[in-house]
Amino acid sequence: MCSSNSKFRHRQPNDTASPPTLFDINGRRVLQPATSNRNSTLPEPPRPLKTTLSLPKSISTSKANQPPASCTTPKSVIPVKKAKNGTLYDRNPIETNTDSSPRSPPGSIAAARRKQVAVMQVQRKMKIAHYGRSKSYSFDRNCVTSAVFVQQKRCSFITPSSDAIYVAYHDDEWGVPVHDDKILFELLVLTGAQVGSDWTSVLKKRQQFREAFSGFDADIVSKYSEKRIQSLSSKYGIEVSFVRGVVDNSKSISEINKMFHSFNNYIWGFVNHKPIVSQYKSSHKMPVKTSKAEAISKDMVRRGFRQVGPTIIYSFMQAAGLTNDHLITCPRHHQCVTLASPTTPTPPSFVK
């Protein structure tokens, strides 16, 4: 019979084994099997497990972030955005909860959107009533509803850095229908002078133009001599060619006054004595010239006018109110419409 130790391999004389090694694992001493000197290096003891687990940063264990037990989790989560003034408001104005608490306080996107929709509805009713498409809404031409001005602002080419004289020109004159011959002549000269310059510089020299051209009296300017033209050019710093062009235009206006009784009847006859009302939402969509401006320019050139290209004529039409190019978001758009009262023009007497 074999002894009880026969199932183990007998150790050879030259076979030396290292004594068992003790390791501490999580505070417990564990006996590891011995190794022979064939493997000169001992295996590294296993690293102890961490006793604490760190939660992700996105998960907070503070009690302040935990909802109270009485609160119920809403079915849908609405993102919340913080405004510049510190007010919290919802990005999605649609309310998902049925509670009575207001979800769109004053100053929120939903409240601003409701105001904008109300303004658009008022504008639509005014437009329909103005053109006689509906009789259910009474439109008072002498006043404009104050709600229209809630979200309206000036035309986009009027910026915070615009000069005060240019802003005043936009608010008081630009787009207003003009029927005075002297003012029409003045605007025709100013629009020609702003080519290669800007309206602000021209408006600052407006008084000098009035003094140089005798208050834009066409009959007086048409009698300027060459000596007077040279002196005006040197005195006011105006190019000689431009002064000559103004004198030639005054002569053409004098001839038109004989045929149409006034320059007003002639120029407003191209638009049937009624301003053209545009509906632009952005100043970038405004054209620099139109087919109507090209037709007026062609006729004026045929009658001896100078410096009256289609671009200059279209700018003149905007300034004199022949076309209302104020943006529909500008308060002056509706005001210029109310100021465009129908006039009874004098029947022109055509002379061939």
Image: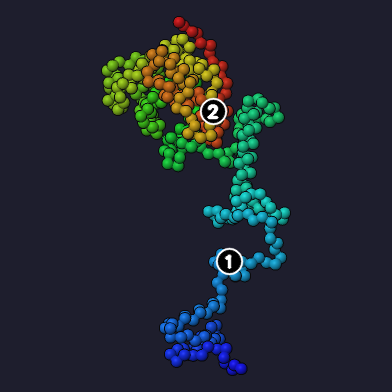
Q: Is residue 83 above or below residue 198?
A: below
Front residue of 251/280: it is 280
Residue sitting at 45 percent across and 42 percent down?
A: 160
Render colour scheme:
rainbow
Toward which corner of the image does residue 87 lie, by quadrant?
bottom right
Q: Which residue position holds label 1?
A: 59
Q: Residue furthest front?
A: 1
Counting labels gives 2
Horizontal and vertical percent for residue 281? 53, 34
Q: What is the C-alpha distance between the residues marked 2 and 1? A: 58 Å
Mark 1 neighbour density, 10 Å: few (under 14) some (14–19) many (20 or more)? few
Which residue: 47% across, 80% down? 44
Q: Residue at x 49, y 90 (%)?
A: 11
Indicate whether 346 appears above or below 242: above
Q: Position of residue 33 (x, y in %)?
A: 52, 85
Q: Quadrant of the N terminus?
A: bottom right
* Dots 2, 1 in contact, CB < 8 A: no
Q: Secondary structure at mark 1?
A: loop
| Label disc, if present, on residue 114 of the rendered structure | none
x and y percent of residue 142 in the render?
Answer: 60, 30
Give whichever of 351, 326 is nearer the camera: 326
Q: Is residue 276 visible?
A: yes
Q: Secondary structure at mark 2?
A: loop
Q: Position of residue 62 (x, y in %)?
A: 60, 70
Q: How crowded is the residue under tag 2: few (<14 C-alpha within 10 Å), some, or many (20+)? A: some
Image position of 235 (left or right of 251): left
Vertically, is 115 above or below 311? below
Q: In the rendered image, which residue does mark 2 sit on?
A: 278
Residue nearest the observer in this picture, 340 or 107: 107
Q: Quadrant of the C terminus?
A: top left
